Image (cartoon, rainbow, N blue to C red):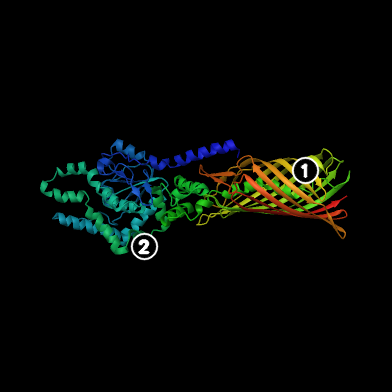
Amino acid sequence: MCRATKRRFIIGSILFACLSNSPAWAENEISTPYLTSASNFRDIAGISKNYGGTGFVNDTSHEGIMRTGVFYRSPKLFNLSSVDFNTISGLGLSLIIDLRTPKEIQDAPDMSFGINEVYHNIFGTQDTPHLSYITPEDVRVSFHNAYREYITEEGQRKVLKNIFLDLAKTPKAALYHCTGGKDRTGWVSAVLQSIAGVSDATIMNDYLATNLYMETAVNKFLKDYPESMWPILKLRLGVEASYLQAALEQVVTSYGSMQAYLLQGLDLTPADIYVLRAKMVYYQSLPGQAQFSGNAARGATFLNSLQNSPLSGQYSNYNYYLQAAIDAGTLSGVETRVGGQVHADAAAYLLRQPQLIDNALTTLASGQNLKFGEGKAWLSGLTENQEVSSRSGIASSDSRSSGLIVGGTHRFNENASAYAGASYISNKVESASADADIDNYLVVFGGRYALSKLETGPYMGVRFSAGALDYKSTRPLDYGLGTATGKTDGKTYSGRIDLGNIFERGTFTITPQLGLLVAHIDLDRFDEQGSELALKVNGISETIPSLLAELRVDLNGRQLGNWVFQPSAVIGYERALDTSNVTSTGSLYGISVSQESAYDSRDLAKLGLGISARNGNFSLQVGANLMAGENINSILGANINFLYTF
């Protein structure tokens, strides 16, 4: 990713992070219309100010807020006005649940909305129970008993289970109702709000709002009866806190808690409960999200934003994980794994690979000590291990490589030589519990030209390389989220130009050198597989130029038997001319997540030691290099070279 593009991406990511929360905030105000022909109709997300609510959606536990437009409660949908019918038709419903008995339905059938309508007769009888009331207390006792039966009666519990399962499985919004929309509907609403984590006080307030919603209709009804009957009729036509309280107390008596009632009494599974809760609630901040930084913060934001994706409120692994994490109060490290940091780490490591090759080629490619017209064939085995420590919100990374370079060098005359080679390097990069295996197939070529001769004085060297990448990644996400795997291809290029001077000082030679290295990587985009959270990973295109300074000291060779041994040492400094970290990006359902590489060191210091042994036309060279930089534990490389002069 080029720097300008990266800056635009970061700005876009900030805007997206803000906008990704907009669905919940946009739903924050309650705007459910009042239906004159179905007065107790409302959204269970909250109550308007006119009817005893705050005018905003209800808050829930764990920093959640209720979503509007998910579940509606209502009285019977009989004889609706055309305005009210059109209002309900425009809600985007996919399900209507009728909780009434067959006799109630026969007397006042619902108007047809052309969508799926199911019948769940909570009472399980042909008609509602016929009770006689003499005093207001008789009414209260009857309702207390009726509400307790939602908990104690096995038949009613089975019906309630099916109601909640249908609500969980419906793809869009749903409406449920009985006749008045206050008792059977009121209990279903109270249970749903309890699942959502709404406070007990708010649940009771919303329950009692029935009296305000139905006040006009009840007062109109009472005019046809003598005032002496009004106390009993008001208790029958409205609700009282003691009704709902009777049911809630029975829940505790029979099961100990609402959660136990759901799991044991209604035989719902945790997955059922989590689907219902996710449909109803948007969590503005996930556990620990406010304290995260770096990649962890971006991963948590991504997990948060997925609440507005098709994975949320469904029987998905993501939904179960997130809801369980909310209950547990921790994201359990998934925030560090979900964004795919390993892709950025792999690209950052491959951008450093030219230095590994150059360390091996230093003595192989120079053409020194060859006669005019001579050449040498060489084989180099190389290995490197890079350990980068973690930094704020970014996991540590560990990269390893090993490979072979085979090639030859030819000296044309006193001043010039050239070389060419082919290489295979196997790389493994590990970070954030993920790993990437990359095979790099390279060709390398270059040459050196000296003003006087190759063995002494000023010179200029050039080197070019091009590689083809075979990239495979594995990202275990854990916690039931599966393992995201991906594969793609890519290319690497690098070029280097050096200016140096060889000074002979009797028993040793000193070679100071300055250079410019430009490394580039193109990693093609790919789609991961194997997990609901598998990403569509964007391609990575990065170029990093670096200035290099080295001082090399070679001692004169010493004869031991038939062998000539020559030790050497080098110290060096590398300065990246641009930021050295790499950013990878991926997306899912249009929601983007970016990750930075752990490697972010613009300054590196190098110390290298080597020794060569020559016997006639055959030479053996061994070298080791140690590099250190900011937030780098170590970069340790080694190579062994075999040469034959011909």
Identified at 88% across, 59% down, the residue is 562
Left or right, 102 with reference to 13: left
Q: Alpha-carbon neighbours of circle 1 within 10 Å: few (<14), some, or many (≥20)?
A: some
Left or right, 515 with reference to 560: left
Nearer the camera: disc 1 or disc 2: 1
Q: Nearer the viewer, residue 488 or 128?
A: 488
Q: Please give the residue where the numbered disc 2 appears in the rendered image.
A: 264
Q: Which label number is shown at residue 61?
A: none
- In the picture shown, does residue 159 fall above or below 111? below
Position in image of residue 615 (x %, y %): 86, 56
Left or right, 589 with reference to 215: right
The disc, 1 or 2, on the residue closer to the chain's N-terminal end is 2
> From the image, which quarter does the N terminus lie in?
top right
Identified at 85% across, 52% down, the residue is 644
The answer to whether residue 100 is visible is no
Q: Nearer the viewer, residue 360 or 23?
A: 360
CB under 8 Å between callouts 1 and 2?
Answer: no
Q: Nearer the viewer, residue 594 or 531?
A: 594
Q: Amino acid at mark 2?
A: Gln
Q: Alpha-carbon neighbours of circle 2 within 10 Å: few (<14), some, or many (≥20)?
A: few
Secondary-structure class at tag 1: strand
Q: Amino acid at mark 1?
A: Phe
Q: Which label number is shown at residue 445?
A: 1
